[in-house]
Image (tube, grey):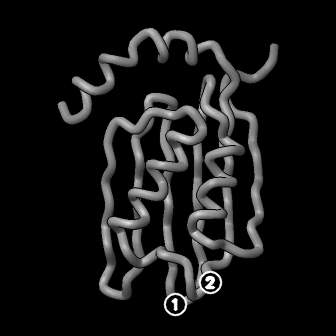
Amino acid sequence: MPGMEAASSYTSLRRQEAVSAKRLYAIDAVCTSASPVTDVGTLTRLAVAAVQSGGGHVLDTSDVVFPNGAVTLVLILAESHLSIHTWPEEDLIAIDLFSCGAIDGQRVLDELARALRLEKVRVTEVERGRPAS
C-alpha cells in the first residue's frame, strides 16, 4: 500500500491527533501574473515548504496537469491533507487544508499565499469532527 511505510512512522502522532481539534480551511484567491501555479514542480515545492513551516509532515504527493495548464495537487499529511486546484484561465486558485493536531494551519496558509503571490485571499474556517453532545 503506497505511503504505509511513511505513515507508520507517525503512529504516535496520529494517536495524539485523533483526540485533537480538527479544522478545514477553505481558501479562494486570485492568482497574479507572478504566481507560479502552472509549474507543478514549483507548486509542489512551495506547498511542501508551507506545510513544513506550519509543523506538518508530508507523507506523499500526487498531481495532475490538465491540457490548459490547470493543476490539481494533493499532499497527504500525517496531520491529514492539503489540496490545491488551479484555473489559470480564470486566475483562480482554491486550496483546502484539513488539519488536526499540532499543525499550524494559519501559518501554512499564510506561507502559501505569500509564496504563491496570491491576491484577494478569502479564508473560510470550519470546525470538523464529532459534534458536541
Q: Is residue 69 left or right of residue 132?
A: left
- Residue located at (66% from left, 72% from top): 118
Horizontal and vertical percent position of residue 87: 51, 80
Residue at 61% across, 79% down:
31
Q: Nearer the viewer, mark 1 or mark 2?
A: 2
Q: Which mark is residue 89?
A: 1
In what quadrant of the picture does the C terminus appear?
top right
- Spot occupied by residue 113 in the image (x, y as percentages of width and height): 65, 63
State the image coordinates of residue 2 (x, y, percent, origin top left): 20, 35
**CB under 8 Å between discs 1 and 2:** no
Disc 2 marks which residue?
A: 32
Choose the circle earlier in sequence order: 1 or 2: 2
From the viewer's perspective, is 15 left or right of 62?
Answer: right
Q: Which amino acid type is shown beneath numbered disc 1?
A: Glu
Give the SS element for disc 2. Answer: loop
Q: Is residue 79 above or below residue 95?
A: above
How busy is the neighbourhood of tag 1: few (under 14 within 10 Å), some, or many (20 plus)? few
Q: Residue at x 39, y 66 (%)?
A: 42
In this view of the protein, which residue sits in the foreground, 45 or 103? 45
Q: Quadrant of residue 110?
A: bottom right
SS category of the residue bearing label 1 = helix
In front: 93, or 58? 58
